[in-house]
Image: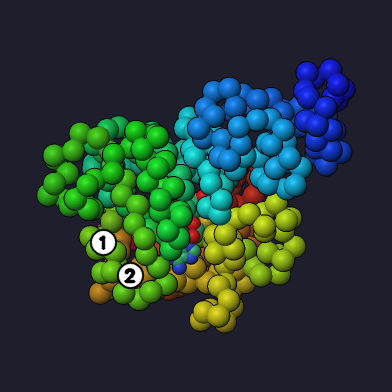
Amino acid sequence: MPAASSGLQPAAARLLDALLKQSTGVQAARNELRWMQEALKQSPATVSGSTDIESMLHRRVTGEPLQYILGTQPFGPLNLLTRPPVLIPRPETEDWTIRLSERLRSFGKAPISLLDLCTGSGCIPILLCHLLPGGSLHATGVDLSQAAVQLARDNSEVCNVTIPPEGPVLPEQCGDWTCNTFLPLLGNIRDPAFVAACGLRPPYDVITSNPPYITKDDYDKLSPSVKDWEDPRALIGDPEGEATHEDARGLTFYHTIADLLATASRGLLKADGLVALEVGEGQANAVAEILEQKAHMKDIEIWKDPWDKERVVVGKN
Ligand SMILES: C[S@@+](CC[C@H](N)C(=O)[O-])C[C@H]1O[C@@H](n2cnc3c(N)ncnc32)[C@H](O)[C@@H]1O
């Protein structure tokens, strides 16, 4: 790209040349520059920490993910806020969340109660709240990270999704709500007391989760733009220093979720409820087996992502 002709100051033009050398091509670098310029023009308040293009290019050249520099990431028709170290919502997750919204439209009952485990930015329940008819969905999300819970709250606000002020919406209160709701809560799903500690009100109609699922070996091979910026707790599937299942392979959180589903006293899911879990490459069959064997889930389906990878395991109670 002829940096000189792009109308940039010399320092910014040098940074753009550096970005061009690092990026996947002229068009990619050109797009990134345009998105940064547009973000500065449209909503300087969300461009976290930068008020000029030179500073944004400098951040990018030193490896910061573009989405943290722009401060937002499209997710379906929404524009979600992004802030380090909370995981940037991925297109794979966007794709299956839209597909799930279509399934929930014909779920046969409303309003639907939904629990999103490991909610992060809140992307899954917030998009579902946006896509489903008002008053048909009351979602709760749980995450271990205070930064994630705050971002999920902020995302609810910018996406006009109501946070119920009095805590979880109870079945007898559903008729009072004409809008969909989402309540993000701080909690550790691996704490055996987490249901009570979070004040959850099971059973739910639907449980969703995109839990951490990367093996430690694969995590070590990730690019610095992921490892240096996104919370390792959002990525590593077998948390270090915690009890993990012996065949872990990134699957510890699926065992945790299946245990939660299986334990009657903590039964999270209604008798005819639905579970949808995002999985990593090559994990779908193992996760389907965990759900069948531990949680006695039926009618297991495996959904592929737009790149033909097995991406979601869906089961019924
Ligand atoms: C892969 S990210 C998914 C975030 C979001 N649902 C999405 O799809 O972008 C996993 C999330 O799980 C959270 N997490 C990790 N361990 C957890 C635990 N023990 N209890 C609750 N949340 C946890 C992380 O903080 C992170 O936000």
Neighbourhood count class around disc 2 (C-alpha, 10 Å): few under 14, some 14–19, many 20 upward: some
In the rendered structure, are the residues bearing label 2 and label 1 in contact, judged by CB atoms less than 8 Å apart? yes
Q: Residue at x 28, y 56 (%)?
A: 204
In the rendered view, would you say 181 is above or below 7? below
Measured from the top left, where is residue 295 in percent x and y?
39, 69
Secondary structure under tag 1 reads loop
Is the residue marked 2 within 8 Å of ligand 1, measured from its CB? yes
User: Pointer 1: residues within 10 angstroms few (<14), some, or many (20+)?
Assistant: many
Name which residue lies at 84% across and 33% down. 14
| In this rendering, position of residue 143 left or right of residue 71 | left
176 to 191, vertically: above or below: above
Label 2 – label 1 distance at C-alpha? 8 Å
Q: Quadrant of the C terminus?
A: bottom left
Circle 1 residue: 200
Please tell me which residue is depicted at 52% across the width and 72% down the height of the picture.
252
Looking at the image, which residue is at 41% across and 47% down?
Answer: 152
Q: Nearer the viewer, residue 56 or 117?
A: 56
Please give the residue where the numbered disc 2 appears in the rendered image: 194
Task: Please name the amino acid that badge 1 sits on.
Answer: Leu
The reply to whether residue 316 is visible in this rendering is no
Q: Position of residue 22 (x, y in %)?
A: 83, 42
Count numbered badges in the picture: 2
Residue 166 rendering spot, x and y as whole percentages: 19, 50
Amino acid type, callout 2:
Phe
